[in-house]
Image (cartoon, helix red, strand yellow):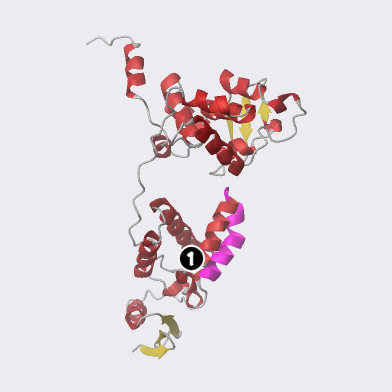
């Protein structure tokens, strides 16, 4: 029979049974303590008990710390992932032991984040990271059998991707008030469908204008790729003020944040509203479908999307352009 005792502001549950190690954990409510005790006793009765004493000692915050130290360095977006780890460590749920967090706790955390203004995608990323911590703990940290509380809850539905396309005259209006570097960068972004971070990190050493290619070694998903440069993209690079200098540094000489700030200022001066720099990647992907004969797999290799589903979310084709392409095709005999 389990023992449930009040301890300060929480409740301590302890299960003792002959032939099994003593198990104990502390919970915020008596109801959670009783539910955990019943679960442990049922697993003992069914012969599927797993010793999770370590999981009852280490907190989620401590597990996140270890995850950030051992797992995050191998990821493509290391700093972004580490920032999320640090933020999660500050939340109240991080003070709970890994083995004491249940699906109901994660559902409450999900709803708490939403009530605080976090968007669906942000919440999904939070839950995905916590889920990865549980998977890693179970597979690599000796906590076999540790239940993953994220696996049993509903995830927020992510809204449809942005459908903003560059309207006629907008790019010209922005380039009219922007400096040469930002103007060339905008043209290059549409021509290559590269991400902002990829453009910011592009170095002259990775550009081969003779072969018209740009090698990306650091990307969002961690996979490097070689992007073919169209004549327009190559010309944009040749017009850069730094093009005549020794090519051993960054092509555009601007950080991701600096690009965003410069773009917003140029849009404000030109009167263009609602167009983000990231929308140029959407525009570029869409034009690859509309204006070229490349197949979907070839386009995916250029844009760097891991799945066709993600590529579809970034592509918004204009119906009139599709009509033009259909009209130009030979009629199929009945």
Residue nearer the viewer, 145 or 227: 227
Judge whether residue 73 is colored magenta: yes
- The residue carrying mark 1 is 138
Quarter of the image holding residue 14?
A: bottom left
- Classify mark 1: residues with Cα within 10 Å, few (<14), some (14-19) or many (20+): some
Tell me where residue 322 appears, x and y as whole percent: 34, 20
Please name the residue shown 47% across and 39% down the image: 306
Tell me where residue 35 appears, x and y as whole percent: 32, 78
Q: Is residue 195 above or below residue 180?
A: below
Residue nearer the viewer, 169 or 202: 169
Tell me where residue 318 appears, x and y as whole percent: 36, 25
Does residue 115 show up?
Answer: yes
Is 222 placed left or right of 92 in the picture? right
Q: Is residue 164 above or below residue 97?
A: above
Tell me where residue 130 appears, x and y as whole percent: 47, 61
Q: Main secondary structure of the magenta part?
A: helix
Please name the residue shown 54% across and 30% down the image: 189
Quadrant for the C terminus, please.
top left
Please name the residue shown 45% across and 29% down the image: 283
Q: Where are the magenta residues, as a range?
A: 61-77
Please name the residue shown 40% across and 57% down the image: 117
């Amino acid at each position: 029979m389990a023992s449930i005792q009040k301890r300060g502001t929480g409740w301590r549950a302890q299960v003792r049974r002959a032939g099994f190690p003593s198990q104990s954990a502390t919970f915020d409510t008596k109801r959670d303590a009783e539910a955990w005790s019943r679960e442990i006793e049922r697993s003992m009765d069914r012969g599927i008990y797993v010793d999770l004493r370590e999981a009852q000692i280490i907190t989620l915050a401590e597990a996140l710390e270890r995850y950030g130290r051992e797992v995050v360095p191998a990821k493509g977006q290391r700093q972004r992932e580490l920032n999320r780890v640090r933020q999660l460590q500050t939340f109240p749920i991080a003070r709970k032991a890994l083995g004491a967090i249940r699906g109901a706790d994660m559902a409450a955390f999900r709803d708490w984040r939403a009530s605080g203004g976090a968007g669906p995608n942000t919440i999904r990323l939070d839950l995905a990271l916590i889920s990865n911590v549980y998977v890693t703990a179970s597979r690599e940290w000796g906590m076999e059998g540790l239940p993953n509380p994220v696996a049993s809850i509903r995830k927020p539905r992510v809204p449809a991707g942005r459908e903003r396309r560059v309207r006629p005259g907008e790019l010209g209006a922005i380039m009219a008030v922007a400096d040469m570097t930002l103007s060339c960068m905008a043209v290059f972004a549409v021509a290559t469908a590269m991400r902002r971070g990829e453009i910011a990190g592009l170095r002259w050493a990775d550009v081969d204008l003779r072969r018209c290619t740009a090698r990306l070694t650091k990307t969002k998903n961690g996979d490097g790729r070689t992007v073919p440069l169209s004549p327009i993209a190559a010309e944009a690079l040749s017009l850069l003020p730094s093009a005549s200098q020794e090519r051993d540094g960054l092509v555009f000489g601007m950080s991701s944040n600096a690009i965003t700030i410069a773009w917003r200022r140029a849009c404000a001066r030109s009167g263009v509203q609602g167009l983000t720099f990231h929308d140029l990647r959407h525009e570029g992907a869409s034009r690859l479908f509309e204006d070229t004969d490349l197949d979907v797999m070839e386009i995916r290799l250029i844009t760097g999307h891991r799945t066709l589903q993600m590529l579809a979310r970034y592509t918004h084709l204009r119906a009139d352009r599709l009509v033009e392409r259909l009209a130009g095709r030979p009629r199929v005999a009945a």
